[in-house]
Image (spheres, helix red, strand yellow):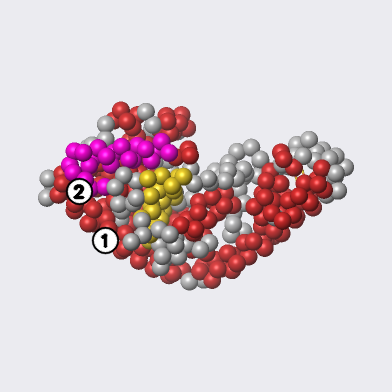
Amino acid sequence: MKRRVFSGARPTGKQHLGNYLGAIQNYVSLQDEYQCVYCIVDIHALTSLEDTGGLQKNIHEMMLDWLAAGLDPRKSILFVQSHVPEVMQLHTLLGMVTPLSWLLRVPTFKEKVKLQPHNVNYGLVGYPVLMTADIVLYKAEVVPVGEDQLPHLELAREIARRFNNLFGNAFPEPQAKLTSFPMILGLNGKEKMSKQADNDIEIALSPQETIERVMMAVTDPARQYRNDPGHPEVCNVYSLHRYFSPLQLDDIATQCRSAKIGCVDCKVLLAQEINSSLEPFRERRAILASKPRHIVDVLADGTQRAQIIARETLREVKQKMGLI
Ligand code: SF4
């Protein structure tokens, strides 16, 4: 029997290169070795979303990208968090075994308070409990995380352990599958690629739109004129060539340093490589997008399969807690 992996991602809509090179490719690669449970965590999004009008569209577009990128509903359970409401019940029950002091010391809570002082809601404090419920509801044994996520997973393990100690073994303590998610910088070359910062390149863009976005990328700031020698090691365009033009990297670096290639040509080359690498993805996406029922059916099937596990876990938890 394959070990079970759980991972969730917020409904951010059309995915960008950072999502693709980080989470999505990793999700796809885990599918053969593990039984994967992948969830779009719409309830988590509510902790910081004040306008929820675009939520359904975001879920649809994100799932289109996931499927076109290779997530296979025959191998993985794909669903939306709120469609399996058992997670909210488990969240409440786990809240009874989680000391408030554990939650108040979580660094991301303090960061969120600074980021949205006008909206310090209960959900922000309870976020790690809901995250734990997401994982243990499906009795996931493995959670792919980057190093920065390790403290969150440790907290989930502590909550699961505390429940097991108080009421008897119900949950496996989820293990981290430490994964090196490449840090993809945005077009400004300063911060992580993200939609909010409007520094992203969506993978579903048309080839022409991709060229236009890549042309906006900041390059080596010291290279003011075409004949100035460049420094590829500090250039974000060059860092993207690492993923999309691996065989030409040495050539690009040499030509950049000797000013044989200009930044415009270098960007055109990058855009062409991105376009050719994403062509099969975009073809699959167009086919999937032409069948709007398909996403609905995939999510309904994923919900049904997730709910079978969820109901069984919740029944066991309630029994152990003396509720039934
Ligand atoms: Fe960057 Fe390419 Fe310009 Fe060199 S030539 S600075 S690698 S964009």
Quarter of image, res 221: top right
Q: Which residue is drawn at 65% across and 44% down?
A: 187
x, y (%) of residue 232?
A: 74, 42
Start-end of magenta stretch:
150-171
Q: Return the disc, 1 or 2, that comes first in the chain's sequence.
A: 1
x, y (%) of residue 11?
A: 45, 51
Q: What residue type is labelled 1?
A: Ile
SS of the residue under disc 1:
helix
Looking at the rendered image, the quarter that the N terminus falls into is bottom left
Q: Which amino acid does label 2 sit on?
A: Val
The Cα–Cα distance between marks 1 and 2, rounded to whole angstroms, is: 15 Å
Confirm whether the magenta stretch covers residue 253.
Answer: no
Q: Is residue 17 visible?
A: yes
Q: Name the residue under label 1.
A: 308
Q: Does 291 sit above or below residue 18?
A: below
Q: Is residue 153 left or right of residue 257?
A: left
